[in-house]
Structures are given as structure tokens and as C-alpha cells.
Image (spheres, coloured by chain):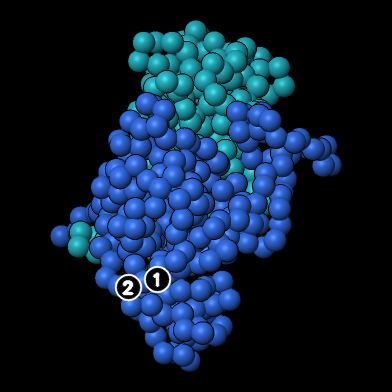
Chain colours: A blue, B cyan
Amino acid sequence: MKKIYPNAAAALDGLLFDGMLIASGGFGLCGIPELLIAGIRDAGTKNLTIASNNAGVDGFGLGQLLETRQVKKMISSYVGENAEFMRQYLSGELELEFNPQGTLAERLRAGGAGIPGFYTATGVGTVIADGKEHHDFNGKTYILETGIIADLAIVKAWKADPSGNLVFRKTARNFNPPAATSGKICVVEVEEIVPLGALDPDTIHLPGIYVHRIVQGQHEKRIENRTTRKKEA
Amino acid sequence: MWDRNQMAERAGRELQDGWYVNLGIGIPTLVANYIPEGVNVTLQSENGMLGMGPFPFEGEEDPDLINAGKQTITELPQTAYFDSAQSFAMIRGGKIAMAILGAMEVAENGDLANWMIPGKLIKGMGGAMDLVAGVGRVVVVMDHTSKHGESKVLRACTLPLTGKAVVNRIISNLGVLDVVPGGLKIVECAEGVTEAELRAATEGTIVD
């Protein structure tokens, strides 16, 4: 089965439907699937629920899908960078489910690993624990969180081989592997597709079993918060 | 009274050789500039990195290399990268010795509020709830009072909690307090601050 597709539209063809749950990789604007997000915008799919640590910024990343009102609900840990998000949320147009960052990562990982729920101490005694099952283990209280199985996972990797084996680069890995595994279908965009055998099997970060479609393209890779130091003279 | 850098310097003295530590956004980030000589700590960035280096030189920024505050950073010879699930597995699993975080309010029982102000500030908790629930020790660096002079070291938090009974030590612009059974214990006063001033600025119960 051929996994490589010529562009984002082709890679998403037949996978999108209104009201679906999409898991997206990325942290801030780092390692986001920017081509596939643009592809979903162009496809016009509506009433999306998106599990993603962040919601992009105004006009870039997932912020684009907010502008077009394609998103019904976000499952995120931090949305502070997006004025349009705040506007839609405060006016009641957009639903928001805050998940602690590690809980979100583990929900995606668990969903992909066939684990329907897990107990965590994160959020005990806070609003996050409201309505959730509490259970004590060894004298400490934990809450039950559920795994997420997404209709579609969209992720960004550095390199792929034609079998879908992936290598990520530096902190652009972040939520991409757990998001990828949570998807019933996973579409990945990469900077480079290398021939079979070009990736050292010992250094593959995510094996191709989790990857169904691959598209290669040019990435803007916008920097959100450019911080530098001066070279000493 | 301590300024931001003096608070960071004081927090730096909490670090112990060999520790893996997570620094929050704001003043806690400055603690990286005040790691005492001879103390070797590895900084964790919860977006998937151990061994966080300094900011890059101009022109050497890499969009694939950022910290949890989305700032461009650099790697070190001991750096390791991993995904977000692995990152929080080490946090939840108690492998991180200490987190130094900012706070909006802290209560005398160690309750921490630092993630939202209902109706005003809705940004999210990020990794803070996971950190306070998972790491070995939580040190909070904060201003002792609000701009209007109201204490932020309280009997009980008024804002939604980040964690219940999670704070071990408070380092404020006025001094250092520990959360102990029954309330807060004064560890030291900041330069030029009397114990009476520290007590007056603290709403929470101080125990001797």
C-alpha cells in the first residue's frame, strides 16, 4: 500500500467529516502540522473537536480554523496566545475543555495504546477533578482520566521513509508521537521523504505502523517568541 | 526588599547538585542565571527536553528548539529530547526533584493558585498542575502582595487551585516561608525587611 501523497488535499481526501475529533501535534507553533491544518481549512470541514496542546496564534496554525469558525470545541492545556480564541470563547461560540498538559499527552498516548482510562494525581482538589471518579492507592488520591481515540491524527515530523517510519527534530517532537498513535487514521507531513533503508532502524522515533498517509512540503516554521543573547565582543 | 533578580538568586540556592529541575515562566526562568558554583543541575523543559541551554546568539535561532515559554533556546552536550507523554511521565513519576513556579496566591496549607482568574484571565494551566502533583518539591517565587498592597500569602486561596497542599516553600520579595503543619514558618527575611513587616504582609497563619 502506497502511503505517500502528492499534497495535503490529496492526503486528507476522504478522511474529513463534519463533527469529527482531530488530534493535532505541536507545542505552541513548534512542530505543528501547518500544511494539514491549511488543508482542513480549505476543505471547510465544520463542527470540529480538536485535541491540541495549544490553539495556534491569530492567523497561523490552528488559529486559521478558528477564524473560519470550523472549530466547535478545543481540548487544550494553554490557549493564551490567541485573541480570536478568547473572543469566541467568551462570547460562547467556542467550547473549551482544559486538560492539564501531561494529562492531555497521556490521554492521547493511552488512547493509542488501547488503555481506556488511567488514574493520575494531577488535578486532584481542583476544578479538573469535578465529576471524575476518585480512587485511593497507597493512601494517596487519584482521579480517573480517559484515553482519547481521535477520528484523525495530524502530525508533523522531520523525516519519513516510504513505510511511514518517522524521525522528529529537537523539541518539535512534543505532542506529535502521542497524537499520532491516538488516531484511527494518522496523516503526517514531513520536511523530507528519504528512501527505504536511509533511516537507521535504531533511531526511528515512531514506527510506520502508526502512520497511514505521508505528504512532503515546505514549512514556514514560524517562531513565536524569538529570544537571543548578544555575542560577547 | 528583594527585586526579581535577588528573588531568583535566592531561589537558586535551593538547587542541589545532581538534581533535575523544572523552572516555570517569569522570575523562575531567571533562576537559570543563578545556579551556584559547583552545583550541577539539569533543567527540564516540559515540551520535551532535558539539558536546556541558554538563549541562542542572534541569527542562530532554531524554530525546532524552544522551551515551555515558547522562547528560542539552545542545547547542551548532555541534552536529550523526548515526546510530551515521556516528558510528563518523568514529571508524574517523581523523577524531577523540584519545580520552581510563579503564583497568584498561596495558602497557609500549601494550596497554590496560578492558572486562572475567572472572567478575566483564561489562558490555561499548561503543565503546572502536573508539575505540582508530581515533582519532589515545589518552590514558589512570587510578590508577597498585590499592586494594591493586599497579601497574596493567604489563609485560603480565593482563585481556582492549581494544586491542593502542594507548595513546600515560598520565596517572595519580602522573604522566605515554609509550609509546615499548622501554617507558615518564617525562614528568613529579605534584605531591609523586618519580621514584623513580613508578618504584616502575610494573611496566612504564621507559626513559630
Residue B3 horizontal side relative to residue A14, left or right: left
What whole-number distance in Å separates the C-alpha atoms at marks 2 and 1?
6 Å
Q: Give the answer, above or below, for where B197 lies relative to B163.
A: above
Task: Identify the residue position indicated by label 1 in the image.
Answer: A11
Front residue of B161/A14: it is A14
Instruction: Report whether B182 appears left or right of B103.
Output: right
Horizontal and vertical percent for residue A111?
64, 57
**Quadrant that contains the C terminus of chain B:** top right
Q: Is residue B62 above or below residue B55?
A: below
Residue A206 is situated, as x and y percent measured from the top left of the image, at 54, 73
Expressed as whole percent of the image width and height from the top left, the position of residue A24 reads 46, 56
Whether pointer 2 and pointer 1 mark residues with C-beta atoms closer than 8 Å, the reply is yes
Can you identify the residue that label 2 sits on? A7
The answer to whether B172 is drawn above or below residue A168 in the figure is: above
Residue drawn at (32%, 73%), measured in percent from left and top? A7
Mark 1 nearby-residue class (10 Å; few <14, some 14–19, many ≥20) = many
* SS for dot 1: helix
Which quadrant: the N terminus of chain B?
top left
> Could you say whether the residue bearing mark 2 is in a helix, strand or loop?
loop
